[in-house]
Amino acid sequence: MLRSLFVRCLLTAALLLACVPASAHSVQITGVSVKIENNKANVLVLVHNPLLNGADPKVAIPQRLKLRLGGKPFQPTNVKIENDPKLDLTTWTAEQEGTPSSVQVDSPVFPEVEADTTVVLVYRDGVQVDRATLTPSHPQAVVGEDHFTVVIRFIQMGIMHIFSGPDHILFVMGLILVGGTLRQLFTVVTAFTIAHSITLTLTVLGVSSMAPRFVEPVIALSIVAVGVENLLKLGSYQEIRAWMAFSFGFFHGFGFAGALAEVGLPKQALAWSLASFNVGVEIAQATIVLATIPTLNYISRRNPVLGGRLVKVASVGIALAGAVWFVERVASYHYF
């Protein structure tokens, strides 16, 4: 019954893929199904025989299947193989004890075959909860997670996205270098979060989008802008900072959306993943504020002149870094 259902799902996927603008290759589907119920994970792999190129499926399929259940490599037991000469298909099934919180596939089954797409379907207690499509350009997916696992993973992802991207760190630091009360500082950072959350959500939902060739240079310009404004002091803290954070936050949100597109969002927990990612970003930004401002305040109290010079030097460095990134990003894209 599961095999029949899975074949129907794959045929539907093939029809959907066939609606994509035609290429020089015909559409091929390799299927991976993970059925989780009764404290057991049943794995089914459906392969077109020509892709095996005469190899023994009992050996070739488990070697090619880069599958992790609950973060650990899949350990197949009770392996069964069925060959369908009429459809020229081989079905490989196996199982593993336990109820994994997530399913991760680290590569298409046939990554060297450009025309082949691996479709992953995940079932929990007989209900399909998630699916993913793997290709050489999008080779990895985490699917079928429970909500708690989704929340933890995307909070971590939001935190790491800030700390792994120096452009976002410098933008936030540029916003808070001029000082202020903690309430004022968190107001600025929260304005940034609200703005990027709006464009991130709209992009993920398919309502709007902006090409990276425009987004990335503007993000670099936003870093230049906060650095220069620190030096020129064009307005008071309240008049300028929150509005700058909010305005440029829209463009940073498009940048965040590009990062999420690379890992994919779980369809069964879209709202949870988006909210958790934003919580992670906010945690990272709050950490930057709490780590930077007390140090600057301490230096300014002990030596006001030195504190003022540090802000100026840091602002110059931030503006220069943004300018370099702007030039690099403009040069790397083809606009005409």
Image (cartoon, grey):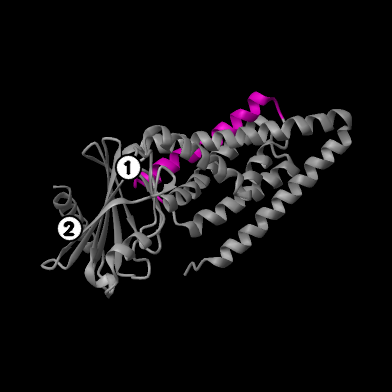
- Residue at the extreme left: 86
Magenta stretch contains residue 23: no
Q: Residue at x 59, y 34 (%)?
A: 189
Q: Residue at x 69, y 43 (%)?
A: 229
Label 2 sits on residue = 11
Q: 111 or 277: which is nearer to us?
A: 111
- Which quadrant would residue 283 be assigned to in this image? top right
Badge 1 amino acid: Lys
Do the CB atoms of the residues marked 1 and 2 lie less than 8 Å apart?
Answer: no
Tell me the chief SS of the magenta region: helix
Label 1 sits on residue = 267
Residue extent of the magenta highlight:
180-209
Q: 256 or 329: which is nearer to us?
A: 256
- Which quadrant would residue 265 be assigned to in this image? top left
Name the side, left or right, on which 260 lies relative to 313.
left
- Number of callouts in the render? 2
Q: Position of residue 38 (x, y in %)?
A: 26, 35
Q: 82 or 182: which is nearer to us?
A: 82
Foreground: disc 1 or disc 2: 2
- Which quadrant would residue 32 be assigned to in this image? bottom left
Magenta stretch contains residue 206: yes
First along the sequence among labels 1 and 2 = 2
Q: Within 10 Å of the Cα at label 2, are there few (<14), some (14-19), or many (20+) other Cα atoms? A: few
Q: Can residue 194 be seen in this view?
A: no
